[in-house]
Amino acid sequence: MTSILNILGERFGAAILDTVEFRGEQTVIVEQARAKEIINYCRDELGFDYLIDVSSLDHFGVEPRWEMVYELYALGNGARHHLRLKYKLPEDTKADSVSDIWPTAAWHEREIYDMMGIEFNGLADHRRILMWEGYPYFPLRKDFPLAGRPSEMPDVAFTDRAPLEGGPFVTSPTSASTVHREPRSREMD
Amino acid sequence: MPETIEQHAAYDSKIEGNIIFTKADAAINWMRKNSLWPMPMGLACCAIELMGSASSRFDIARFGAEVMRFSPRQSDVMIVAGTVTYKMALAVKRVWDQMPEPKWCIAMGACASSGGMYRSYAVLQGIDHLIPVDVYISGCPPRPEAVLEGLMRLQDKISKEESAVAHFQTEKAV
């Protein structure tokens, strides 16, 4: 049986940086420059007609900072294949919008822009989707404090810092004691 | 004419049968507290329990508050039921400002009272940052019984207000 990962590897060669198969889950890590072409091929030739989700990761402190994740699914041919496609991109570049391939991507990409601040080439409606237009921050970035930052937009909305004393537990990956690993709260500013 | 009535010669049953002597405050407060028209500011899951309080099993009509008005101009008490995000906050405030005096506010549930479990960049940490709250109802979400208890607490509070005094003081000020 030829797997999707093999097909992609043969077709795109060096543009496929890595493939991971774990308990039936197939993930392909591709080169940013050819990502759109590969995604297009997945839809047109491999039958991935359904885009489940688009999300993004913030590898704060590591270059390249952003990573895009596309969850593709093949419904139409009855094969029920799931493919995860990832690529990394540096902070000062824009990602390519896939909203021309799957219209549903437009809202996912607006959410990514709203929360992470990654911008997209070819996204027709490049507005925030959850926060209001004019909110100055991107709240899911790693360098944004959990408590939020004060902001003010007269007659639209304001924000303030939330008190975190005794608040939600913030864990950090460290081998230090529990006191350091799971502080009552952590200030990030 | 029977003896008993002559004993109360000053009592004119034709008129006084329909007259009650009371204090203005007591009468006004009694009318206000038994006909509280809520403005249901349903913003999250608390609104579902608020609907439950209004429905037949719990029946908020027993306390005179069944007339849920979706128009702020006709409401007396705003029940803030749910998570107030910063995006919604000024809209809630605006609806509150549109309600005519006298008006009261019930913060229903943890989120409306304090932000609840949302210690986050997006959620107002209690509607009392924007609106004076009369009654806070704990719970996540509160049971309809708790909503009714909160409403009864508000009724108690209203019955102790100096409504007439406040009215005449405003008159004097004008």
Image (cartoon, coloured by chain):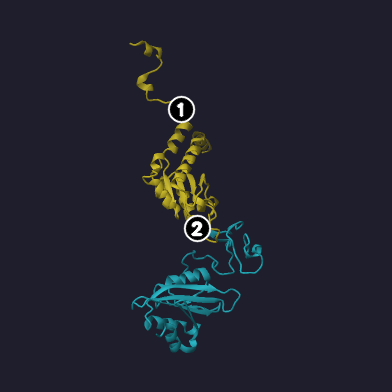
Chain colours: A cyan, B yellow
Element class at badge 1: loop
Which amino acid, mark 2? Thr
Q: Between residue B144 and residue B70, name the one nearer to us.
A: B144
Look at mark 2 in the image and give the residue it sits on: B85
Question: From the viewer's perspective, is residue A21 above or below residue B36?
Answer: below
- Measuring from the top left, give residue B12's x and y in whole percent: 37, 18
* Among numbered discs 2 and 1, the one appearing first in the sequence: 1
Q: Nearer the viewer, residue A1 or B36?
A: A1
Residues marked 2 and 1 touching at CB (< 8 Å): no
The residue indicated by pointer 1 is B22
Q: At which x and y percent is residue B137?
A: 50, 47
* Chain holding disc 2: B
Query: Visible in this render: residue A126?
Result: no
Between label 2 and label 1, give the one nearer the viewer.
2
Mark 2 to mark 1: distance in Å? 46 Å
Q: Give SS at disc 2.
A: loop
- The answer to whether any part of residue A94 appears in the image is yes
Total numbered labels placed on residues in the image: 2
Tell me the quadrant of the picture where the C terminus of chain A can be found: bottom right
Q: Is residue B61 above or below residue A177?
A: above
Q: Nearer the viewer, residue B65 or B74?
A: B65
Look at the picture and state if B8 lies above or below A189. above
Image quadrant in which you'd find residue A53: bottom left
Residue B173: percent from left, percent from top = 53, 38
Q: In percent of the image, x 44 and y 86: which residue is there?
A: A6
